């Protein structure tokens, strides 16, 4: 492994090179067997010199993993007011950022709440000890984020992620949708010095820590976050209003220790399927497995499991109150009562209006219900004897969707 170092006092950059046996050295450059030479970025590189990307300055001594986790948690606790469980999650997430490339899927860490509730403070504190913390905000254009993530393999620290313009939101969503899974680069067309179009793959995989006021409309993207809702209680009285200058020195010392831990642990960690959480959706397990795999404390894993179970219940409750859930309940009941091998769209419309009309304020037409069934539920409608129907062949799919939306549970009459 080769890692870049930056010493702000001497204004120098160098490389920390670690052998497979765990022995490391600090060198000005590194010659490869291919006769290529790796050299570090210049200390005058704007991203490094301004602290936009934070690097270690040396390889420290981390003691053992338990001591390092305690030190990281103490550092976070000193400057940020988090719930106890999320404080533990944040401390282990910091360690995860330093070995993230040992995993194929990653969760994102998020702080969500109104202004003045500590989101930015959390990002600055946790980001300052994350692996190559790269700080950006909603005031940034999105293009540099692609380039920096690809060049550094950094931890993206993104504040005010509620971008004001839809184009920027779409670009950011691409980064977040592709960035949690290894092997999904984003293709963008670049122009070379000859003004020729050159499609380029940008690697955006890596840990991300996000602060925002609202959520994303994309439910799949929402499921990738481990979220702390900020502002739910009074601020702890021992939290300083202003970040002291000592934080930078403390964070640098911790980054140096965390680099030593990366050299020690990078090839010792990986996904541990035995730590999957029973009774929750595969997506939530996929999101949390990398974090659970590096947590040694069984009690903490149990607390995170409880959080995941609670999140699944919230998602199911949200789905169960949706129009999709109402329509699925209607179709399940209609098929249970049907004598023919189909359910007419007109019958589904009548049943749906009985349930949903009071909330919607008006009855829906057959055309609207048919379009909803096809476009939102991805079910089939065919014409039979002059009327549109949902065929019996779609019944198994309806049952599966109804179970996913919390409309039915377990083996019921709807399965038969």
Image (cartoon, grey):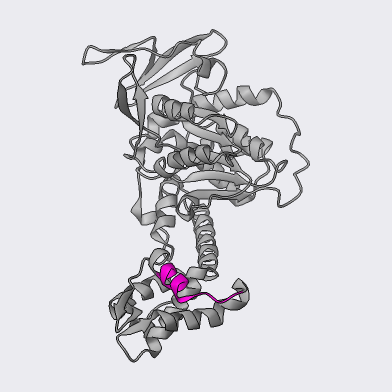
Magenta residues, start to end = 362-373
Residue 117 seen by the camera: yes
Q: Magenta segment: does it hold 366?
A: yes
Residue 376, percent across and down?
Answer: 43, 64
Q: Place residue 14 in its image quadrant.
A: top left
From the viewer's perspective, tell me whether residue 273 is left or right of residue 350.
Answer: left
Is the magenta region chiefly helix, strand or loop? helix
> Which residue is more in the foreground, 363 or 16?
363
Residue 242, percent across and down?
Answer: 74, 30
Residue extending farthest right: 237
From the viewer's perspective, tell me whether residue 33 is left or right of residue 154.
Answer: left
Q: Quadrant of the C terminus?
A: bottom left
Residue 407 seen by the camera: no
From the viewer's perspective, tell me whether residue 304 is left or right of residue 189.
Answer: right
> Which residue is more in the foreground, 197 or 207?
197
Q: Quadrant of the N terminus?
A: top left
Residue 408, percent across and down?
Answer: 44, 77
């Amino acid at each position: 492994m080769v890692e870049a170092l930056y010493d702000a006092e001497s204004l120098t950059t160098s490389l920390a090179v670690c052998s497979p046996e765990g022995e490391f050295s600090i060198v000005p450059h590194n010659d490869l067997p291919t006769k290529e030479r790796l050299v570090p970025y210049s200390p005058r590189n704007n991203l490094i010199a301004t602290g936009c990307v934070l690097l270690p300055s040396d390889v420290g001594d981390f003691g053992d993993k338990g001591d390092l986790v305690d030190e990281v948690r103490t550092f976070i606790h000193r400057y940020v007011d988090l719930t106890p469980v999320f404080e533990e999650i944040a401390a282990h997430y910091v360690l995860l950022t330093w070995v993230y490339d040992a995993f194929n899927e990653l969760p994102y860490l998020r702080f969500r709440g109104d202004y003045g509730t500590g989101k930015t403070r959390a990002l600055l504190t946790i980001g300052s000890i994350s692996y190559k913390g790269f700080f950006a905000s909603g005031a940034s254009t999105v293009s540099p984020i692609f380039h920096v993530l690809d060049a550094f393999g950094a931890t993206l620290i993104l504040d005010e992620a509620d971008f004001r313009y839809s184009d920027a939101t779409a670009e950011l969503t691409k980064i977040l949708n592709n960035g949690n899974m290894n092997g999904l680069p984003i293709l963008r067309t670049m122009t070379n010095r000859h003004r020729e179009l050159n499609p380029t793959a940008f690697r955006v995989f890596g840990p991300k820590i996000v602060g925002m006021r609202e959520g994303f409309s994309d439910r799949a993207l929402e499921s990738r976050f481990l979220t702390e809702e900020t502002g739910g209680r009074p601020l702890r009285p021992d939290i300083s209003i202003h970040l002291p200058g000592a934080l930078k020195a403390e964070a640098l010392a911790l980054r140096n220790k965390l680099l030593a831990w990366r050299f020690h642990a990078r090839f010792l960690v990986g996904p541990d399927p035995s730590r999957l959480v029973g009774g929750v959706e595969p997506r939530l397990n996929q999101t949390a497995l990398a974090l659970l795999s590096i947590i040694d404390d069984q009690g903490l894993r149990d607390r995170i499991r409880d959080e995941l179970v609670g999140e699944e219940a919230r998602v199911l409750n949200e789905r169960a109150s949706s129009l999709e859930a109402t329509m699925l309940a209607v179709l399940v009941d209609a098929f249970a009562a049907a004598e023919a091998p189909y359910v007419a769209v007109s019958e589904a419309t009548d049943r749906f209006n009985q349930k949903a009309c009071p909330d919607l304020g008006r009855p829906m037409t057959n055309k609207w219900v048919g379009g909803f069934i096809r476009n939102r539920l991805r079910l089939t409608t065919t014409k039979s004897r002059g009327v549109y129907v949902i065929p019996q062949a779609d019944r198994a799919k309806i049952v599966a969707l109804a179970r996913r939306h919390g409309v039915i549970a377990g083996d019921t009459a709807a399965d038969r």
